[in-house]
Amino acid sequence: MNVLQQNRAARWGAVALIGIVLIALPFALSQVGTAWVRITNLAILFTLLALGLNIVVGFAGLLDLGYVAFYAVGAYAYALLASPHFGLHLPFWVILPIGAATAALFGLLLGAPTLKLRGDYLAIVTLGFGEIIRIFLNNLSRPVNITNGPQGIAGIDPFRIGSLSFAKTDTFLGAAISGPMKYYWLLLAVLVAVIAINLRLQNSRIGRAWEAVREDETAARAMGIDTTKIKLLAFAMGASFGGVAGGMFAAIQGFISPESFVFVESVMVVSMVVLGGMGNIWGVILGAMLLSFVPEVLRYTVEPLQKAAFGRMIVEPEVLRMLIFGFALVLVMLFRPAGLLPSAVRKRELAARGEGELAERKA
Amino acid sequence: MSLLEIRGLEVRYGGIRAVKGVDLEVNEGELVCLIGANGAGKTSTLKAICGMLPAAAGTVSYAGRTITGLPSFRLVREGLVLVPEGRGIFGQLTVAENLSMGAFARNDPAGVKRDLEKMLALFPRLAERSTQSAGTLSGGEQQMLALGRALMSKPRLLVLDEPSMGLAPLMVQKIFEVVRKIAAEGVTILLVEQNARLALEAAARGYVMESGAIMLAGAARELLADPRVREAYLGEEAA
């Protein structure tokens, strides 16, 4: 066996090992508490969102501050088609594609009028778009009750495959398989698929066209790239991922209201992308996982720690969360401006800047 | 028959007419230059030809077909390629990646690979730096890269907007050497320049543009000798 084969074998071995650990993870987590399986599920949902936004922000360089709108569209598409609200109960494999397509349509709706905007201006319009969607959801209860307004939609169907319901606990070979565990495996499968799609996109013709548009739009057009189409494609594809994540969110929670889709959520997803490393899929996943888990860990440790140290709670975990969150972002921007795991392109840019400074100093 | 033929081209920015009825022709294999002062409408003319700006009036024909209003990405596939003002290289991509981006509209991988090698041979400076990010190149090298990248799309008509802008005199000479070399290989070139002397020396024919209209046109040699051109663009006192 030569070195190359050995490396390949080692790599596949590592992948298999990670795979087994990830599949077995919910058993370990449920030993600690089913809450942790739920937390992990939400973390994966946010990772899906971050990966979707990464297409728009990281690949195509279009800053979108209203991304949660697509999450909302997907969630409401699911909720309206699988709840007592309209009395519709379609299966999830029908609704998820509908949710993705509807979100993609909204992506085009946002993309088309903003084609000529860049940077800050685009950010402001997308921010407004996110708010518009939320306000619509809040008010579309009259004269015809579509969204049930601020009360939200309750009793949303869980995923069902035949007689297997994702809401109930089943016993399989003597082991209890809870609902959240089933969702975990489903989410894991979706995550793997989304990562695969992202990796393929990055190295495709479309990926290169996005890169060109991000760098210089005029030059991209001069290369024969249809920048209009390619930008709309970024918006639509990014949105469709958000739509899928939204649909799964609705099913997992069983209840949604416009409250779940506020501006802060968009900021959160953007932060995940920026913190992890814009344009780098693994960086984005790391950022999403960190920003999802750290607050939860805090929630469970801050209170007992403070009680043990001071006998009472001085700082609420929620307050601490925002403090640490802001501090972490400042630190990352200072010391790793391209994110924790920067994309190859950005790493190169920073290295080049370093060289430039060195050359300037010499001169 | 001329490869590019423009009749009565007008470009407007709101109420302002930047280009006021320009007629211009470029024959196959020719190097034609368009000179004029800042704000004369040269870049607007080019952008309207290449589909980057809408034409308010007039027609642009290319290879016997009217192309007025066609978007630039379609024209690139037809071989009408613009090297935009200010170079517009992809700063974060490597030199090699920039070059292959030039072949975006092509789908003959073997030919692209051959052309990539050809470019690296034509621009040894770029070959040395092929894995470096393009943003680290000097201005002159970036212009070389912009030219090389445009050549990667196999242009039939190459439209150059101010290739000498902001470059050191020595570098300007080098760029013009390359432009001549490209022309010698049979690529038709329409060159917009502020450096009127160099442009007229390289070109076969020239057009002089002033406040949105063509003031003079003719053989480059005659324009170089024309007292009006000498006074206004070559910085010489009228004799």
Image: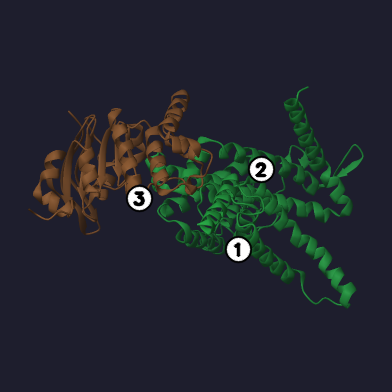
Q: Position of residue B63 (x, y in %)?
A: 24, 30
Q: Is residue A248 above or below residue A189?
A: below
Q: Secondary structure at mark 1?
A: loop
Q: Mark 2 or mark 1, which has the lower sequence index? A: 2
Mark 2 or 1: in front is 1
Q: Residue furthest front?
A: A363
Is A307 left, or right, of B229 in this rendering? right
Q: What residue sits right under mark 3 in the picture?
A: B168
Alpha carbons under labels 1 and 3: distance apart: 54 Å
Residue A172 in which image quadrant: top right
Q: Position of residue B201 (x, y in %)?
A: 21, 40
Chain of the residue on which disc 1 is drawn: A
Chain of the residue on which disc 3 is drawn: B
Q: What residue sits right under mark 2 in the picture?
A: A92
Q: Position of residue A339 (x, y in %)?
A: 63, 54
Q: Residue furthest left?
A: B239
Tell me which residue sits at (82%, 46%) in the image: A26
Q: Secondary structure at mark 3?
A: loop
In this view of the protein, which residue sits in the foreground, B88 or A203?
B88
Alpha carbons under labels 2 and 1: distance apart: 25 Å
Q: Within 10 angstroms of label 2, few (less than 14), some, or many (20 or more) residues?
A: many
Q: Chain B rendered in what hue?
A: brown
Q: Secondary structure at mark 2?
A: helix
Q: What residue sits right under mark 1 in the picture?
A: A262
* Tag 2 near tag 1, CB within 8 Å: no
User: At label 1, which amino acid type do we have?
Assistant: Val
Q: Are labels 2 and 1 assigned to the same chain?
A: yes
Chain of the residue on which disc 2 is drawn: A
Tell me which residue sits at (50%, 52%) in the image: A62
User: At label 3, which amino acid type do we have?
Assistant: Ala
Tell me which residue sits at (82%, 63%) in the image: A300
Q: Chain A rendered in what hue?
A: green
